Image (cartoon, helix red, strand yellow):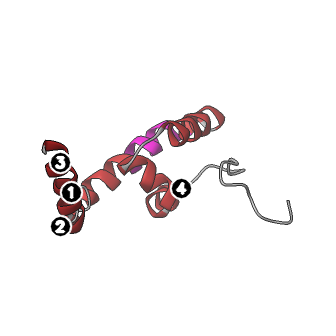
Amino acid sequence: MNGTRKANQMKAVPFTLTELIRHDKFIDWVLNPDTIQDRYWHDYQVQFPESTGLIASAREYVLLLAVDTGRHKPSAEQSSKMWEVVKGKMK
């Protein structure tokens, strides 16, 4: 695999709390979960069962930070686009 890991390949050792809260894939899973990411993080917790509490703490931190920074809300541009779609469907 010439030194690079596939996107869905597990890390060989458990993440630390700091690594998780800085990990783009983890943050995206917390804020925008989907089936593929759910499967990855479920499998991660099966591989590293001792990480379950750490995962929960990191999720809570990411969610609190998202609320604190307003990241959990759509941007003005996103809201505008969504409203245009809604208006278009009302015609």
Amino acid found under the numbered disc labelled 4: Thr
Q: CA distance from mark 1 to mark 3?
A: 18 Å
Residue 84 in the magenta stretch? The answer is no
Q: Magenta residues?
A: 51-58
Q: Does residue 37 lie above or below 6 as drawn?
A: above
Inter-mark Cα distance, 2 to 1: 9 Å
Q: Quadrant of the C terminus?
A: top left
* 26, above or below 44, in the image: below
Image check: 9 left or right of 32?
right
Q: Which residue is mark 2?
A: 76
Instruction: Tell me the tag on residue 73.
Output: 1
Callout 2–callout 3 Cβ contact below 8 Å: no
Query: Could you tell me which residue is drawn at 50 percent across and 36 percent down?
Result: 35
Which type of secondary structure does the marked residue at label 2 adopt?
Answer: helix
Relative horizontal placement of residue 9, taking residue 57 as reference (left or right): right
Instruction: Specify which label sits upstream in the sequence, 3 or 4.
Output: 4
- The residue that mark 3 highlights is 86
In 3D space, how far apart are the residues under numbered discs 3 and 4 (Cα atoms)?
42 Å
Q: Secondary structure at mark 1?
A: loop
Residue underneath mark 4: 16
* Mark 2 or 3, closer to the camera: 3
Q: In the image, which disc is placed on residue 2?
A: none
In the image, what residue occupies the spot 62% across and 49% down?
A: 14
**Closer to the camera, 82 or 69?**
82
In terms of image quadrants, where is residue 64? Answer: bottom left
Q: Earlier in the sequence, mark 1 or mark 4?
A: 4
